[in-house]
Amino acid sequence: MIKSVLFGSTSVLLSIGLGGLLSGVLWAEQSVSLVQAGAKHIIDHKGMQTTGPMAQLGTDGTLHLAWGGEKQEERGVFYLKVPPQQEQYPEPTKVNPSSPPATSLHEPPALALGHTNDVYITWTTPHPNADGKPFANLLLLSRSVDGGKTFLPPVQVNDDETVTGHSFDNMTVSPNGSVHISWLDAREGKKDPATYTVVSQDQGNTLSLNLKIDDSSCVCCRTHLTTAFDGTVYLAWRKVLSGAVRETVVSRSMDNGKSFSPPVIVGHDQWVFEGCPHRPATMGVDQEGRLYVTWYTEGPDDTPGVYLAYSDDQGKTFTPRRLLNMSKGTFPDHPQMAVNQAGHLLVSWEEQSPVRREVVFTYSLDRGQTFSAPKKVNEKKAKSPAVALNDAGQAVIAWSEQVAFPGWSTVVHPLSFPTSRMAQLPPKP
């Protein structure tokens, strides 16, 4: 089912340095450090329709992947664990039992790693009383306490039984081992759903009562969670403001998810859009507490862009947004970001045109001050990137690619970052 292939040389050296200002971002010119790229691995799904992947890396470099799949109307959630340096990928494990089934392939399952060999996956299943009502589902948590070898029976996350949507979920594990889950929930029957969270302090054995964070959330822009090393929990979603203005916002919890601060607008995009973009924000925090956010917007001038901003005061304020995509002839889409303690950033997104669909990535080795020029990683039509980066400098980009038409495969591309932090920018003269 899985094979390894190498496109080009085994090591591609990618330089980053100090350059000129382009679209609000310093781009690389003079080489001062290197990121090394390894051989790509192709996961052949053998005719199964799949979501894009979710990816995580353990502290030792163990790769964890999750995706949704459907074949002959049987829908499943799949998990794959690959130890470091293992060239032959094993067969994936089906996470969900035959009943209940997983829902449609509109988004991949959420995936998070604990600190004691525990693995967590959230996914949705059709509501048993849906009776044909579209998007009516329940949110479930599957967990493994043996490193992903087996998964316990799933538990329901949403604590209501309303026949409506409970989806667009995300998950993170805090330094104390608490499992935090967020999602969009339409139980109140309003035009726009609300953002909810829940927390477990016992490896998913029990869950707290559902906590409503905010009304008027964008109906299909996925939520995102991350935690800082001091235990602060950050939650991002796209909020619908008066006049159909859609803004990425961030809220924080200082009490392990018991309560959250009022949301803070990140980019002040002023994007007016009468519909749901279906494009989430992603976040990460370094060891000094800097919170980074990437997101997609078309505001205020109807120009699609992938942006980055960061906060040094726990999400109370953010820097002016900075454009990451460079191409003028393509449509940037679906950014994903990973951050490690050293302040290294890996960001990947799609670049679409009328005839092509690419996956590109950029990185920063100096806490978001400069970025490498975006680099394409796919060979054929590609979509749905996911990224992971650990504190040892091991990184991975995974995406869906039409390696052999008409089917789609998952491609995994390992990268190696420097293990020490890059020198800060020199002072201005």
Image (spheres, rainbow, N blue to C red):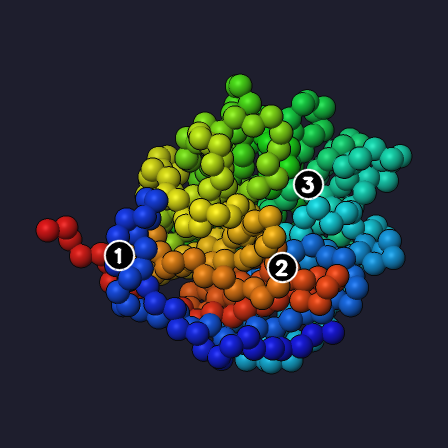
Q: Position of residue 82 (x, y in %)?
A: 62, 73
Q: Which mark is residue 338?
A: none
> Where in the figure is residue 186, as x and y percent of width and height?
69, 30
**To which residue does mark 1 refer?**
19
For image coordinates 60% across by 77% down, the residue present is 5
Q: Nearer the viewer, residue 191 or 116?
A: 191
Q: Residue at x 28, y 62 (%)?
A: 29
- Residue underneath mark 2: 381
In the figure, residue 194 lies in which quadrant?
A: top right
Q: Residue 253: tell me if it is visible.
A: no
* Picture layout, residue 318 above or below residue 371: above
Callout 1: few (<14), some (14-19), or many (20+) C-alpha neighbours within 10 Å? some
Identity of the residue furthest to the top in this view: 243
Total marks shown come to 3
Res. 52 image quadrant? bottom right
**7 to 56, vertically: above or below:** below
- Which label's residue is closer to the chain start, 2 or 3? 3
Circles 2 and 1: CB atoms closer than 8 Å: no
Which numbered dot is residue 167? 3
Can residue 68 be seen here? yes
With respect to residue 382, does 90 lie above or below? Answer: below
The amino acid beneath tag 1 is Gly
Instruction: Please name which of the two marks, 2 or 1, marks the residue nearer to the observer.
Output: 2
CA gap, disc 2 to disc 3? 28 Å
Residue at image point 49% right, 80% down = 10
Q: Residue furthest left?
A: 429
Q: Nearer the viewer, mark 3 or mark 1?
A: 1
Query: Which is nearer the eye, 241 or 229?
Result: 241
Which of these two is toward me, 370 or 290?
370
